[in-house]
Amino acid sequence: MRAAVYRTFGPAEVVRVEDVPTPTPDAEDVLIRVHAATVSVTDATARRGSPAFSRLFFGLRRPKWPVLGSEFAGVVEAVGPAVTRLRVGDEVVGVTGPDFGAHAEYVRVHQDAALAAKPADLDFAEVVALADGTALAFLRDKARLGAGQTILVNGASGSVGSAAVQLAKHFGARVTGVCGTANLDLVRSLGADTVLDHTTDDFTRAGQTYDVVFDAAGKSSFGRCRRVLNPDGIYLSTVPSAAILFQMPWTAAFGRRKAVIAFTGLRKPAEKGRDLALVTELATAGRIRPVIADRYPLERIAEAHRHLDRGKYGNIILTIPGPADPPAS
Ligand SMILES: NC(=O)c1ccc[n+]([C@@H]2O[C@H](COP(=O)([O-])OP(=O)(O)OC[C@H]3O[C@@H](n4cnc5c(N)ncnc54)[C@H](OP(=O)(O)O)[C@@H]3O)[C@@H](O)[C@H]2O)c1
């Protein structure tokens, strides 16, 4: 099969399309013909092998997993003899384990992996753009966001932030989105009640307070955001720092305002699968929509990585069309 492979850490050009052996499913595995996958910030971090501590996970001297890609959508091509949950021909959206592998024509996952049925009214690229459950896990499970609460989403135009704005509206919250100038209209169109431009406004000095500050971009800190949190407010960050790793247990024990970091990728596959089913349901009901910055066919994987390195809004999608699909854009 064709796959996007990298064998050394470095710039976008280290990723090349190669022929590699197609995985064969073990007894409880399913083999999925991938039609679309996200090319995410995690893929870029793994490709660069930077920051240095990330190599503890991605490989010390060379990449541990040569094919990147976590979120995928496709069609079940083959199933192992003990598979009961899926059948050949099922259209699914899913997330691989920590070993990646979705930037390829085929990916093999266990039948109990994070998987959900693809709704018929979303195409493969659209459904995979909804598959990252980070925003849902933070807002529902960590903030317990509810109707009437106020939330500020920092990095509201990104993959996590654009989902967070829409989900926060779905939960009935009043939403302020913070993004760059070029993305103000996008964030407004996602339902944000107020939109701030981080290039001209400092939300920590604007005099407004919130029940929740969700720093989806990891560009702020609990220290700076403390003053814009209501007395029982919660600061959530997607990006680990020495400070928040200390502040989280400290604020859990003392004081009313809390600082929270979470690693949503480490959740159980069953939990992620349930969240996939929920977000696809919300999308089908028109409550949320995928945000796609660009689509690149597999052959242009290095371009997709260059796009990531420049910075992006929403999601970058890798398409892997089969013979029966329309030509890739
Ligand atoms: N902890 C976890 O479980 C977890 C899970 C997934 C992702 N993450 C992390 O979450 C972070 C965001 O991921 P993502 O996929 O959403 O990234 P992304 O799509 O690249 O979005 C980042 C957004 O940040 C905005 N931004 C840039 N500078 C900013 C600033 N100074 N202030 C406010 N916003 C700014 C950019 O928008 P503008 O161009 O509009 O400024 C961009 O849309 C990454 O670091 C990723 O590694 C963590």
Image: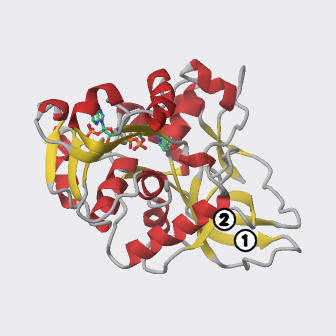
201 and 4: which one is in front?
A: 201
Q: Does residue 312 appear to the left or right of 102 in the view shown?
A: left
* Residue at 68 percent of width and 25 percent of height: 56
**SS label for mark 2:** strand
Q: Is residue 228 left or right of residue 256?
A: left
Q: Quadrant of ligand 1?
A: top left
Name the quarter where the N terminus is drawn: bottom right
- In this rendering, is residue 7 above or below 265? above
Kind of residue sitting beneath label 2: Arg
Q: Amino acid at mark 1?
A: Glu
Separation of marks 2 and 1 at Cα, in angstroms: 6 Å
User: In the rendering, at what x and y percent does residue 112 appear?
Assistant: 73, 65
The residue under label 2 is 33
> Residue at coordinates 27% horizontally, 26% vertically from top-left?
224
Q: Position of residue 43 (x, y in %)?
A: 55, 39
Q: Is residue 322 visible?
A: no
The residue at 32%/75% (across/down) is 286
**Is the CB–ligand 1 distance for label 2 below 8 Å?**
no
Tell me the residue at 32%/63% (across/down).
Answer: 146
| Residue 164 at x, y percent in the picture | 35, 54
172 or 20: nearer the viewer:
172
Residue count near mark 1 (Cα–Cα under 10 Å), binned few <14, some 14–19, many ≥20: some
Discs 2, 1 touching: Cβ within 8 Å: yes
Please tell me how crowded label 2 is: few (under 14), some (14-19), or many (20+) other residues with Cα within 10 Å.
Answer: many
| Residue 159, image x, y percentages | 39, 49
Number of disc labels: 2
Q: Which residue is mark 1?
A: 77
**Which numbered marker is on residue 299?**
none
Of callouts 2 and 1, which one flags the residue occurring earlier in the amino acid sequence?
2
Front residue of 271/35: it is 271
